[in-house]
């Protein structure tokens, strides 16, 4: 009964119409029961629409393969630009915040490049079932978003958390889905569930701290990755066969790192086992805004 009042509020929100999304303040630790209540309260006609748009294909592939690669910068890395801290300077001004739109890490690796499968109905490997309805955390931490880019599935709950000692107001407007705009007090969190997958990462901002910018990327399947500090990525357990992939980078959108990658899109045949795109050089001129 500990969530009775919250559930009543959620059910009332659901009654407003099929386009409504349940939004609720969560405890600091992810609460499995409460995550279920968010999902249940967002049901009804809205859930039926989500089933049509975001239903996962069954795991029917005969074989599975992994895809790896590494993006590295070619040319002098862009200058790291500090951000103007104009609010809560005593808290946010001590973290050395900088523009994260082009991040070059170890060994000239290009960080925060997104690569994902564009197929609409891809078989999903059974290993992904364990996390299909998990709660995933996107944190306001040190007056920036952590991680900077977060992929998740439309069947998962997004927990927008605030680890800072000041309040944040997180905003996101996914295309064709319910917008989100809510104040999050210190050491609190709010839950949101997407009903439609997006074809590019969705920007998240803070109306209190205008320099803050991050991204969440809801997809119907789990086949998306973000490059790490050294520019490398891995997408595990893809269905074998020929597929289309998309590469996205914050400063430019579709990243045509190779001549045949038109607007960042390319076709590649996944073989059973390991598949490697190798080292992918990115000319620094491609990253100019």
Image: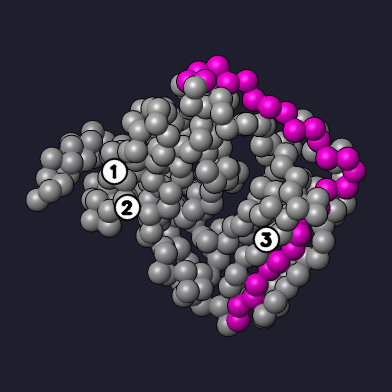
Cα separation, mark 3 vs mark 2, equals: 27 Å
Q: Earlier in the sequence, mark 3 or mark 1?
A: 1
Q: Residue furthest top?
A: 86
The reply to whether discs 2 and 1 touch (Cβ–Cβ < 8 Å) is: yes
Cα separation, mark 2 vs mark 1, equals: 7 Å
Measuring from the top left, give residue 195's x and y in whole percent. 41, 47
Label for residue 30? 2
The stretch in magenta equals 63-89
Q: Which residue is mark 3?
A: 233
Q: Left or right of 108: which side holds 139?
A: left
| Residue 75 forms part of the magenta stretch | yes
Report crowding for label 1: few under 14, some 14 to 19, many 20 or more residues within 10 A (C-alpha). some
Measuring from the top left, give residue 81's x and y in whole percent. 72, 28
Q: Earlier in the sequence, mark 3 or mark 2?
A: 2
Measuring from the top left, give residue 134's x and y in whole percent. 38, 59
Q: Nearer the viewer, residue 239 or 95?
A: 95
Report crowding for label 2: few under 14, some 14 to 19, many 20 or more residues within 10 A (C-alpha). some
């Amino acid at each position: 009964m500990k969530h009775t009042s919250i559930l009543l509020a959620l059910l009332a929100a659901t009654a407003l119409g099929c386009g409504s999304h349940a939004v609720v303040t969560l405890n600091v630790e992810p609460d499995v029961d409460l995550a279920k209540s968010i999902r249940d309260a967002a049901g009804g006609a809205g859930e039926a629409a989500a089933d049509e748009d975001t239903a996962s294909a069954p795991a029917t592939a005969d074989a599975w393969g992994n895809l790896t690669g590494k993006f590295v910068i070619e040319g002098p890395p862009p200058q790291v630009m500090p951000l103007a801290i104009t609010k809560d300077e005593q808290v946010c001004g001590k973290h050395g915040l900088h523009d994260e739109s082009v991040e070059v890490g170890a060994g000239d690796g290009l960080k925060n490049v997104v690569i994902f499968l564009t197929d609409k109905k891809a078989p999903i490997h059974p290993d992904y079932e364990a996390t299909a309805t998990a709660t995933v955390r996107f944190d306001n931490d040190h007056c920036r978003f952590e991680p900077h880019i977060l992929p998740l599935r439309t069947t998962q709950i997004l927990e927008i958390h605030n680890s800072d000692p000041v309040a944040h107001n997180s905003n996101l407007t996914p295309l064709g889905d319910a917008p989100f705009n809510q104040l999050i007090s210190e050491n609190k969190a709010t839950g949101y569930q997407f009903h439609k997958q997006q074809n590019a990462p969705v920007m998240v901002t803070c109306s209190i701290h205008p320099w803050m910018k991050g991204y969440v990327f809801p997809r119907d399947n789990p086949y998306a990755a973000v490059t790490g500090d050294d520019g490398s990525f891995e997408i595990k357990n893809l269905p074998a066969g020929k597929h289309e992939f998309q590469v996205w980078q914050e400063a430019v959108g579709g990243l045509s790192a190779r001549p045949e990658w038109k607007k960042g899109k390319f076709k590649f045949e996944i073989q059973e086992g390991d598949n490697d795109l190798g080292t992918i050089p990115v000319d620094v001129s491609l990253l100019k805004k």
